[in-house]
Amino acid sequence: MKLSILGARVIDPASGLDQVVDLHLEAGKIIAIGAAPSGFSAHETIDAKGLVAAPGLVDLNVALREPGYSRKGNITSETRAAAAGGVTSLCCPPNTKPVLDTSAVTELILDRAREAGNCKVFPVGALSKGLDGEQLAELIALRDAGCVAFGNGLESFRSTRTLLRALEYAATFDLTVVFHSQDHDLAEGGLAHEGAVASFLGLPGIPETAETVALARDLLLVEQSGVRAHFSQLTSARGVALIAQAQARGLPVTADVALYQLILTDEALIDFSSLYHVQPPLRTRADREGLRAAVKSGVVSAISSHHQPHERDAKLAPFGATEPGISSVELLLPLAMTLVDEGLLDLPTLLARLSTGPAQALRLPVGKLAVGAAADLVLFDTGSSTVAGEHWLSKGENCPFIGHSLPATVRYTLMDGRITYPI
């Protein structure tokens, strides 16, 4: 298939390219940027005048819910939703059922993703067997089966010594470990950020120190073990300050933040809406400003959806009995564009945090537009708006942004030169 994309504003954060230029694709690759190669004749063209062409978005945390949670979603439905959000590559966490701690589960996910054909899926394997924090998973077998990194989610290791040994083992084989730093004891039973809003609502709180205590420990262990580490789902200003200090000391650490943490605060809980029940929790305005500043400076190099689809019943109980999480990958690009609309980020910087940054954090072979690279890209319109939820593809409708008008529209998503959205 030969395809030409004509007249788009092409932004590639990896190379610094930002100009109106044509793109020419063949056999799933970008074969030219600018003039078409001699003898090239496109089978199809896309008139992209007025559109922005950028690398397909790379989302580091998208729960696909398969295997084990088909009532919440599956690989086909959630990768289709991801493509609608401009995503061409995503990482799925290990908290499936059974847990993603064997080659068989890894291969199942990869096979289903290839069959669906909507996104490139990069599994994150479990760091410990069953995510129970006691025995190390078979990391090398998981790596060979296709896992790109390893983590334990919010499940704690029972022993800091065991965690250190796991990190030392990972460092020996140059594996990347993904941390979700939250102290189990400090967070246990909590539903919201420990502060004025939680006190007013009578909700048990999770203090900021649940993140910072665990984060300080984890950073010291990273320094001792020499492991390459990525810190995911940071929520506090003090947390990103600790990451900045570690980076200044030369530690090989990167970080991401959930997009909704850059938009919402704990004040959203004032009406007890379970749509805002997330773990780790939404925090204060000061924390949100700290996260935004870290994204702008590059201390936090990746913005992710942290997409967690749920069936309707999971959000219908009283607040404390509902399941945490937001279904958001379908809105990743339009929702992220609110940060440009508000003047927080310029467009090239936002696209860097959504593509190049996450790809580099986990060393994924994606996230750039270059001759010879895979033709993974998104074409979007900044001159039109998207009404969130108007055409919903995810099985999870647990999204507080449904009905909102968002300042951009995804027109096309292409993976390996093939249009995956719209279909």
Image: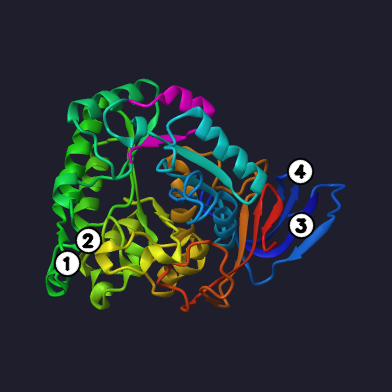
Which residue is depicted at the point 43% across and 70% down? 340
Q: Is residue 151 a member of the stretch shown in magenta?
A: yes
Q: Relative to residue 351, is residue 288 drawn left or right? A: left
Instruction: Using the image, tell me which numbered label, if any, was put on residue 27.
Output: 4
Query: What separation in Å lies between label 4 and label 1 (alpha carbons)?
Result: 55 Å
- Helix, strand or loop for disc 2: loop
Instruction: Using the image, tell me which numbered label, if any, was put on residue 47.
Output: none
Badge 3 is on which residue? Answer: 4
- Helix, strand or loop for disc 4: loop
Which residue is depicted at the point 49% across and 56% down? 71
Query: What separation in Å lies between label 2 and label 3 (alpha carbons)?
Result: 50 Å
Instruction: Using the image, tell me which numbered label, if any, was put on residue 191.
Output: 2
Q: Residue 392 falls in which quadrant of the image? A: bottom right
Which residue is depicted at the point 63% across and 51% down? 118
Query: What separation in Å lies between label 1 and label 2 (alpha carbons)?
Result: 6 Å
Badge 1 is on which residue? Answer: 203
Circle 2/circle 3 CB separation < 8 Å? no
- Magenta-highlighted residues: 136-152
The amino acid sitting under disc 2 is Leu
The amino acid sitting under disc 4 is Ala
The amino acid sitting under disc 3 is Ser
Compare residues 133 and 320 and report the one nearer the observer.
320
Crowding near pointer 1: few (<14 within 10 Å), some, many (20+)? some
